Every structure is written in structure tokens, then in C-alpha cells.
């Protein structure tokens, strides 16, 4: 009887929360990060209600998902490469990069707030203890959920920190030595001219944010959530409890952090590697002279890429003794050599972690960067967006990679970049050194996120 009473008394020590997540950004990589955190929360008994563009990639008990398509996700699914290239050319310049991000975010937020199921949610008497949002990706209007349910906000910053994240968190703006990630691809060792450019880009960010973007976000709140008691969105964003940032202190330029900024870079990676499909495993295992993994992520419309680029990759790969695993949505490529295998999907961390993998040909995305650093594999990068150019600059500063601009892609340029990496052992040595730093953590990034 005493044992029973003790066990019953322990039950009151456990508190399970009801969590709401509204995450409309149409990014597969971001969704993997989200679900990596939600899975661990669900395992601890918390109930999670998710509205997002992607369902969970695996079964998660205690989690309910509602599809949340937006016009942005529909747009990216129908992009031609010319349309994509036009946006890439625009975002190559700082002001248009930030402008494009905020415009797309405003469109997504409006799509969310005018949906019937969201209106019903905001009019319901449901209760939530915590709200997950991506406020600092230009989604300030979604703070209506925090006001409605009187619940604190956990902000997920899917990219590294930048000036607006610092400002909202109450952090200092160290413009003299911290490059603006959405700006020019500088390092922390900027010349006087580069510091002036960094300062100017930061000022432009805040001007556009306060005089254009925030008024647009406030308009959405007033149009779709008619509650006069709700504070202005500029005040709501200051109520963020913590921001989970997709970065690691040990693998970024030295910078200050406030206690409410929690780096969780690499949280999307599981400690248990997903097994390779049988045919892929055979191909990778037989790459005795080394394996090159080629992936441009999920955002680049490769199926519409001009044939001159595709042929340049094919011609370069023909000259290599290594095998090449090419993740692409293209089903058939003429003249594909025997050492190249196409696949629509593959568990990227598993491939990069294979002992035969000697090089990663990448677009330089942040999620791929975490996986690359963990695996200790050097890279050749072809960046498309400002953030990816920033990442490639960081690769180069660490001595683990080489950058190629898309317009410079020829079979000779691709071949030269690959062979430069493979014939210079310093790239591999530096990559292994970085990997040892990444792995040396007292707690996994996902567990860190759940702890906070």
C-alpha cells in the first residue's frame, strides 16, 4: 500500500503540455528540423498540434498534423528554371534579397490567416501551453496565436542569427566584425570598405523592416484578427521567450549571444543513421576509389535546368575514376557514364558518413552544411542564394571547400574544382578537424532544444 501511495504521488510531478506549431514555410529541410524536435517532445508525453506545409516523415505519437499549403509552396512547385534564375539574380544583391524574403513571408502569412481552418482555430476555445512559430523569418503577424491562447512563443530560426534576430532578442549589433548573413558574403575579418557595406546593409534591413514589412504584417493582423486588445506586432515579437537558432557556437564567426538565444545547429540529424536502399548501398560500397555525392537540395528546379549545365556535370564526371551518386529529380540524362548513378531520394547524412565518401558537390545550404561538418567531408559548392554564398565563404575560410558560381560552370571548371580538392590532402584534414569539433558536445542539439 505504501509503495502504491508513493507511485501515485510521483504522478503529480509530471506535467504534459499542449503545444501548437504554425509553420507555413515551404521548406523540406526546415520541416525535418521541426519534426526532430517535436518527436522528442512527443516522446516525453506532450501533445503537439502542427499546421505546416509538410507532414511528418515518420509516425509520431501524440502529434496531429494539418496540411497548410500556401501560394509560395505552389509557386515553387511550378517554377521554370528561368523564373528561378531571375530570382537568384535579384537576390544576389542585398536589398532585393531581404525584400524578396519579406514579400514571400507576407504572402505566406496572409494565406495562413485567411484559411477557414485557421479562422476556426482562432475562434475556438482550445487551450495551448506553448506556441512554435518562425517569427524571425518575416512571420510577425502569426504572433496572433500567442495573444489568442495566452501562451509563450518559441521562435525557430531556421537560418543562422542575423541583425533582426539580435535586435528582437536584445542582443548587441556587432556590425564591425559580424557579417550580415543576408548581405554580402564577408568573413569576420572585414576591410574598412566591407565594414561600411555591412553597416549600410544592416541599416537598410532595419529601415525596410520598420517602415515597410512591419506595417504589412500589422495590416494582416487588423484584417484577419479583429481584436483591439492585441498589441502592435512590433511589441508582440519582443514577447518571444526563446529563439532556437540553427547554428553552433563552435562553427561560426565569434559573436555574442544573449541567454534567450539557443544554438541548436544540427538538431535535424538523428543519432541513428537511416539505412541506405539496397541498390544505393551496393553502389556506395563498391566505390573503392571514392564516392562523390552530388545534390543541389530540394529548392532548385533541376528538371528545368539548361542542358549546358547538366552536360557540363556529365562531361566532368566522365573523367573521374570515382563513382558519383547524383540526387536529382531528373529521371533520364543522355550520355550518363557508368560511374554515375541517379537517385530521387537518399538519406544524405548516411551517404556523407559512409567511409567511401570523399567529396560533396552541394548548393551550400545550411542544413547540408551541418551534415557535412559532422561527416568531415570537403565540398565543392555552387551557391544560388545570399545565405548559401555566405556559407560557401565560411567553407573557404575553414579550408574545407571551393566555390563555383553557376554562370562559371563548365565541364573543365567542375573537373578542376573536384580534382583540386581530391589532390590536396589539406581539405580532407581540415574537414576531419572540423568534424571532431562538431561532435564534441555535452548534449545533442535536439536534446538541447527540448531541454530549453
Image (tube, helix red, strand yellow):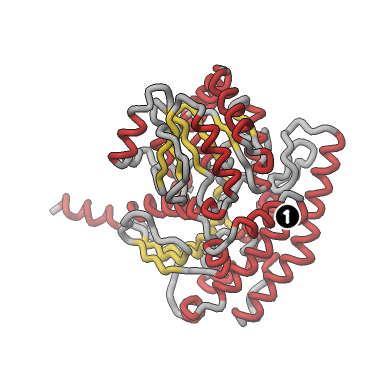
Vertical relation: 326 (above or below) 33: above
At 46% across and 50% down in the image, what residue appears? 330
| Residue at (53% x, 19% y) in the render | 429
Answer with left or right where residue 176 lies relative to residue 7: right
Where residue 356 appears, as percent x and y from the top left, is: 40, 26
Indicate the quadrant where residue 447 lies: top left
For residue 317, side relative to residue 289 (left or right): right
Q: Nearer the viewer, residue 303 or 73?
A: 303
Q: Residue 225's spot in the image, x, y percent? A: 60, 79
Q: From this viewpoint, is residue 13 visible?
A: no
Please give the residue where the numbered disc 1 appears in the rendered image.
90
What element does badge 1 sit on? helix
Viewer-proximal residue among 293 and 158: 293
Q: Is residue 306 visible?
A: yes
Q: Position of residue 81 (x, y in %)?
A: 60, 56
Question: Does 356 sit above or below residue 242?
Answer: above
Q: Quadrant of residue 137?
A: bottom right
Q: Tell me if residue 88 comes above or below residue 396 in the rendering.
A: below
| Residue pictured at 57% horizontal, 51% vertical | 305
Amino acid at each position: 500500500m505504501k509503495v502504491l501511495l508513493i507511485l501515485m504521488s510521483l504522478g503529480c510531478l509530471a506535467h504534459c503540455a499542449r503545444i501548437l506549431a504554425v509553420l507555413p514555410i515551404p521548406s523540406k529541410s526546415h520541416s525535418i528540423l521541426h519534426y526532430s524536435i517535436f518527436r522528442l517532445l512527443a516522446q516525453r508525453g506532450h501533445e503537439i498540434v502542427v499546421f505546416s506545409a509538410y507532414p511528418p516523415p515518420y509516425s509520431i505519437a501524440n502529434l496531429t498534423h494539418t496540411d497548410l499549403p500556401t501560394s509560395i509552396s505552389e509557386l515553387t512547385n511550378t517554377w521554370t528554371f528561368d523564373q528561378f534564375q531571375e530570382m537568384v539574380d535579384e537576390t544576389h544583391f542585398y536589398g532585393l534579397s531581404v525584400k524578396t524574403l519579406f514579400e514571400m513571408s507576407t504572402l505566406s502569412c496572409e494565406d495562413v490567416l485567411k484559411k477557414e481552418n485557421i479562422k476556426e482555430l482562432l475562434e475556438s476555445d482550445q487551450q495551448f501551453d506553448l506556441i512554435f512559430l518562425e517569427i524571425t523569418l518575416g512571420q510577425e503577424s502569426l504572433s496572433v496565436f500567442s495573444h489568442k491562447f495566452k501562451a509563450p512563443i518559441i521562435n525557430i530560426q531556421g537560418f543562422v542569427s542575423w541583425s533582426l534576430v539580435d535586435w528582437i532578442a536584445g542582443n548587441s549589433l556587432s556590425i564591425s566584425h559580424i557579417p550580415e548573413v543576408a548581405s554580402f558574403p564577408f568573413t569576420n575579418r572585414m576591410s574598412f570598405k566591407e565594414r561600411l557595406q555591412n553597416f549600410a546593409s544592416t541599416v537598410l534591413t532595419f529601415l525596410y523592416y520598420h517602415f515597410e514589412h512591419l506595417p504589412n504584417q500589422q495590416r494582416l493582423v487588423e484584417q484577419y484578427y479583429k481584436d483591439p486588445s492585441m498589441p502592435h506586432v512590433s511589441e508582440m515579437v519582443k514577447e518571444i521567450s526563446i529563439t532556437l537558432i540553427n547554428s553552433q557556437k563552435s562553427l561560426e564567426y565569434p559573436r555574442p549571444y544573449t541567454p534567450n538565444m539557443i544554438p541548436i545547429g544540427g538538431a535535424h540529424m538523428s543519432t541513428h543513421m537511416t539505412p541506405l536502399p539496397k541498390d544505393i548501398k551496393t553502389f556506395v560500397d563498391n566505390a573503392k576509389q571514392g564516392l562523390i555525392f552530388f545534390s543541389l537540395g530540394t529548392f532548385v528546379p533541376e528538371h528545368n535546368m539548361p542542358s549546358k549545365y547538366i552536360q557540363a556535370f556529365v562531361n566532368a564526371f566522365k573523367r573521374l575514376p570515382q563513382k558519383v551518386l547524383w540526387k536529382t529529380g531528373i529521371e533520364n540524362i543522355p550520355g550518363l557514364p557508368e560511374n554515375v548513378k541517379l537517385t530521387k531520394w537518399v538519406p544524405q547524412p548516411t551517404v556523407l558518413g559512409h567511409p567511401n565518401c570523399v567529396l560533396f558537390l552541394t548548393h551550400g545550404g545550411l542544413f547540408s552544411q551541418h551534415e557535412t561538418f559532422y561527416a568531415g567531408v570537403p565540398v565543392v559548392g555552387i551557391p544560388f542564394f545570399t545565405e548559401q554564398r555566405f556559407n560557401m565563404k565560411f567553407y573557404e575560410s575553414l579550408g574545407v571547400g571551393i566555390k563555383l558560381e553557376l554562370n562559371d560552370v563548365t565541364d573543365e571548371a567542375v573537373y578542376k574544382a573536384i580534382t583540386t580538392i581530391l589532390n590536396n590532402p589539406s581539405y580532407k584534414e581540415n574537414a576531419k578537424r572540423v568534424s571532431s569539433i562538431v561532435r564534441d558536445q555535452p548534449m545533442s542539439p535536439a536534446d538541447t532544444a527540448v531541454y530549453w
